[in-house]
Image (cartoon, rainbow, N blue to C red):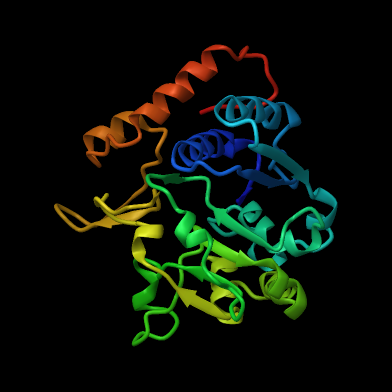
């Protein structure tokens, strides 16, 4: 199976935890592809991080692989200029360059770096994608305001099964890159994908953006809203253990967090990647 992560030096912690959670919940060989770049104040993920992650996952299964791909040149050649100043990091849009990278296989599961795996997902990964570009779960809030309100077909882009064969043939990502370059949007790459792609909705358990449930496969720690005692946006990430326990009452990933801590004890603090 193939997994895709994207981002800069600041998301190493999330990638590490997500990869650990995937290894825990599958018996198949997994290839982890990481797209990174250096642009403006964003520094690319270094090879030293990929090497550490590779060594860690291969202790669990020899067939696991980690492939780090620095695509700074491609990204700088097609910067999403209209959306570089939004609250969303421009390096989220690295996934829209996956069609340009020969190493990226014809089928791959994209995950945001704040998504943890809670159960086996091979049934979803094996689904037939022949007539579609992307498969995903409706966005928790966006489904009410974007896309077709009756169909609720506005997908959250944090967990997307990608048919790269179709995407390369029909130029979907190229169209999305142009849109992000020329048109300012809210959640730019997510909006572009929803507008341009042939989509398929899958069960919410594959991208649970709310409270943990017994059947949750992927838990996405995305921003949510609290309305009482006053309205506020809340963002809690899986590595924020106290908030994870005290505010979200989530304990399902404690073993992953403990393993992460143990792994970091063996890493010198003068390494060239950062952990929050």
Residue 55, compared with residue 195, is above or below; it is above
In the rendered image, residue 110, in percent from the top left (x then y), is placed at 58, 56
Q: Quadrant of residue 188?
A: bottom right
Residue at the farthest left position? 229
Q: Quadrant of residue 273?
A: top right
Residue 199 in view, yes or no = yes
Q: Residue at x 40, y 41 (%)?
A: 237
In the rendered image, residue 256, in percent from the top left (x then y), is placed at 41, 30
Q: Residue at x 59, y 37 (%)?
A: 10
Q: Is residue 29 left or right of residue 249?
A: right
Residue 182 in view, yes or no = no
In the rendered image, residue 50, in percent from the top left (x then y), is placed at 69, 32
Q: Nearer the viewer, residue 177 or 17?
A: 17
Residue 166, compared with residue 44, is above or below; it is below
The tally of labels here is 0
Q: Nearer the viewer, residue 167 or 141?
A: 167
Residue 263, compared with residue 121, is above or below; it is above
Q: Residue at x 46, y 59 (%)?
A: 123
Q: Nearer the viewer, residue 159 or 186?
A: 159
Q: Residue at x 43, y 44 (%)?
A: 116
Residue 94, compared with residue 198, is above or below; it is above
Q: Is residue 234 left or right of residue 267?
A: left
In the rendered image, residue 186, in percent from the top left (x then y), is placed at 51, 69
Q: Quadrant of residue 94?
A: bottom right
């Amino acid at each position: 199976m193939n997994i895709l992560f994207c981002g800069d030096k600041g998301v190493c912690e999330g990638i590490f935890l997500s990869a650990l959670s995937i290894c825990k919940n599958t018996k198949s060989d997994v290839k982890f592809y990481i797209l990174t770049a250096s642009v403006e104040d964003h520094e690319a993920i270094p090879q030293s991080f990929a090497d550490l992650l590779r060594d860690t996952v291969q202790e669990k299964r020899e067939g696991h692989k980690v492939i780090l791909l620095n695509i700074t040149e491609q990204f700088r050649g097609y910067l999403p200029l209209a959306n570089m100043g939004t609250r969303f990091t421009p390096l989220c849009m690295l996934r829209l360059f996956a069609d340009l990278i020969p190493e990226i296989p014809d089928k791959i599961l994209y995950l945001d770096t704040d998504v943890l795996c809670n159960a086996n997902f091979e049934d979803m990964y094996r689904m037939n994608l022949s007539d579609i570009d992307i498969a995903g779960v409706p966005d928790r809030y966006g489904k009410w305001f974007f896309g077709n309100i009756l169909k609720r077909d506005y997908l959250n882009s944090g967990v997307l099964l990608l048919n790269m064969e179709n995407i390369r043939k029909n130029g979907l990502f190229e169209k999305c890159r142009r849109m992000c370059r020329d048109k300012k949007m809210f959640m730019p790459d997510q909006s572009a994908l929803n507008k341009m792609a042939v989509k398929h909705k899958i069960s919410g358990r594959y991208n649970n953006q709310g409270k943990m449930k017994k059947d949750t496969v992927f838990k996405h720690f995305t921003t949510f809203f609290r309305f009482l005692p006053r309205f506020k946006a809340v963002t809690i990430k899986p590595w924020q253990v106290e908030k994870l326990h005290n505010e979200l009452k989530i304990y399902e990933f404690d073993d992953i967090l403990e393993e992460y801590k143990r792994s970091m004890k063996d890493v010198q603090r003068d390494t060239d990647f950062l952990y929050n």
